Amino acid sequence: MKLTLRVWRQRGADAPGHMASYEVDGISQDMSFLEMLDTLNEDLILRGEDPVAFDHDCREGICGACSLVINGDAHGPERTTTCQLHMRSFADGDTIDVEPWRAAAFPVVKDLVVDRGAFDRIIQAGGYITAPTGSAPEAHATAVPKADADFAFEHAECIGCGACVAACPNGSAMLFTSAKVNHLNVLPQGSPERETRVLDMVARMDEEGFGGCTLTGECATACPKGIPLPSIAAMNKEWLRAVRKGPR
């Protein structure tokens, strides 16, 4: 395959950015998208040019670090992570636009790499428990109701990649925050902090500069793990419940 890539190049958060065009040839349909970018970077290095910076880690669809906007879609045209997107999803001669997550709360570090530390700070605001559970056997001695376990497991699938934010017209982190709140609050270990957690995490989300949720649904469509949009409604119920408890 021979492809034309239009890639976002930006030296740093304060530097101006631009789309640069590159041609890559000899691309196999069985290559992953990241392997294709590796091929591009090998060519750039041989020509003495600066390779394209992009983020990745496991390359197994687990961590979500490989976050790119491809032809306007978070992670590309398939429901998967970028590292598990293969070049057979494209045609010979295609022009492919490759951009970073675009959100005020995700500043560009370099080229296609963004700082998603805002997600970590949202988790830090509420991702804790104070209920002692003892050793692992003791902790598992009390069964969690299956409905609660299934709900928590579904929301624990969120890998924090940020596709929901990149896809949202407002750059909202509501789907990410709701998944984490629903995961922690439904489990018995997290119950003591149930009200304070949701208030603290929502407050931190606002402080980080994420936009407001308008329930347009792009976030759930872009999520590579298929986190359901109704999870936002579930978190809203938690938020109302916490607010009605009165000031902390």
Image: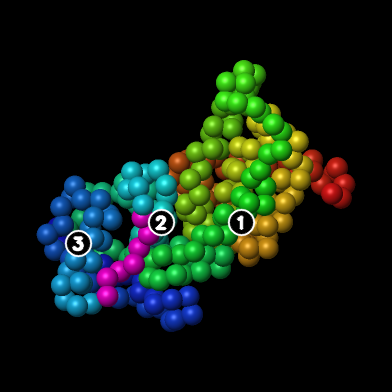
Residue found 71% across the figure and 45% down from its top: 197
Q: 38 or 168: nearer the eye? A: 38
Q: Look at the numbered discs 3 and 2 and tell me whether their residues touch, using CB distance below 8 Å.
A: no
Q: Where is mark 1, residue-wise?
A: 121
In 3D space, how far apart are the residues under numbered discs 3 and 1 (Cα atoms)?
A: 35 Å
Q: Is residue 242 magenta?
A: no
Quarter-of-image position of residue 120? bottom right
Image depth: mark 3 or mark 1 in front: 1
At label 2, which amino acid type do we have?
Answer: Ser
Closer to the camera: disc 2 or disc 1?
1
At a point 14% along the width and 63% down the height, the residue shown is: 25
Looking at the rendered structure, the kind of residue marked 1 is Arg
Can residue 147 be seen at all in this image of the molecule?
no
Residue drawn 44% across and 81% down? Answer: 15
Q: CA distance from mark 2 to mark 1?
A: 19 Å
Where residue 90 appears, as percent x and y from the top left, is 24, 54
* x and y, in percent, of residue 11 in the image: 39, 77
Provide the secondary structure element on which disc 3 rests.
Answer: helix
Q: Nearer the viewer, residue 26 or 3?
A: 26
Mark closer to the chain start, 3 or 1: 3
Snapshot quadrant of residue 203: bottom right
Residue interval drawn in magenta: 50-56
Instruction: Provide the major secondary structure of the magenta segment.
Output: loop
> Which residue has dot 3 on it?
39
Left or right of residue 85: residue 152: right
Residue 67 got which mark?
A: 2
Task: Name the residue type under label 3.
Answer: Thr
Query: Which x, y percent locates residue 148?
Result: 63, 26
Q: Residues within 10 Å of mark 3 (few under 14, many from 20)?
A: some
Residue 247 makes an appearance in the image: yes
Distance Cα–Cα, label 3 vs label 2? 18 Å
